[in-house]
Amino acid sequence: MYGDVVPPAGEYGIAHWMIPKISNVPDIQRAIDAVFERLGLTSLGWRDVPVDSTVLGPTSRASEPAFVQQLIARSAHQPAPDLERALYCARKVIEHTVDVYASSCSPHVLIYKGMLTAPQLRQYFDDLRDARLTSAIAVVHSRFSTNVLPRWDLAQPFATSRTTARSTPSG
């Protein structure tokens, strides 16, 4: 959990990672942190995103990743001049070098996505039922046809929002 380390709005970003459950999460987190540090960013904390896996069907459950969010800010020494650009670049490097996928990594947007039907969305992601998470806008997109076998990282974004959270949900 992040505790009281959340900087003012616009001075931090949140990365929403999908990590294969068979992975060594601490090793993955260290690899991710190293990339952020090279780009003038620092990790302020990690949290497991609370989910209710009981709502999943057998195909989704068999490949369900661990969802982890990371709070990121500019580093104190040699800070990245453009937070949004640095987060984007770090995300691309990380996704090509570490076995993870980010549904979002931004100071403005937080995306929840998965192999879910629209009615499963709020049931699966506990955060979306937490009154402390507020948003100026939210978009739900549902896609029922595809030409590839389903995978969590290929799922369309379900909840995209410009975050205005007053406090971070506990996890």
Image: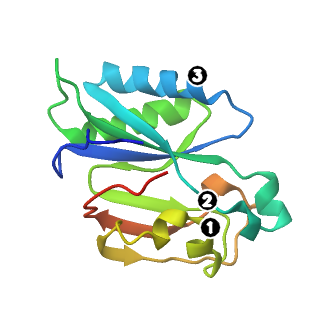
Q: Name the residue type under label 2.
A: Val
Residue denoted by label 2: 51
Regarding mark 2 in the picture, which secondary structure is present there?
A: loop
User: Which amino acid type is shown beneath numbered disc 3?
Assistant: Asp
Q: Nearer the viewer, mark 2 or mark 3?
A: 2
Q: How many marks?
A: 3
Kindly check if marks 1 and 3 are in contact, taking CB atoms under 8 A apart as contact. Answer: no
Q: Quadrant of the N terminus?
A: top left
Q: Which mark is residue 124?
A: 1
Quick one: SS at disc 1? helix
Residue 78 in picture, x, y percent from top left: 16, 19
Q: Nearer the viewer, residue 111 or 68?
A: 68
What is the CA distance from the residue labelled 2 to the residue labelled 3?
Answer: 22 Å
Q: Is residue 87 left or right of residue 158?
A: left
Residue sitting at x 66%, y 56%: 152
Q: Nearer the viewer, residue 154 or 120?
A: 120
Residue type beneath disc 1: Tyr
Q: In this rendering, does residue 83 appear at all?
A: yes
- How far apart marks 1 and 3 lie (CA) works out to 26 Å
Earlier along the polypeptide chain: callout 1 or callout 3?
3
CB contact under 8 Å: marks 2 and 1: yes
How crowded pointer 2 is (Cα within 10 Å; few <14, some 14-19, many 20+) is rated as some
Q: Which residue is tagged 3?
A: 27
**Quadrant of residue 97 within the rendered picture:** top right
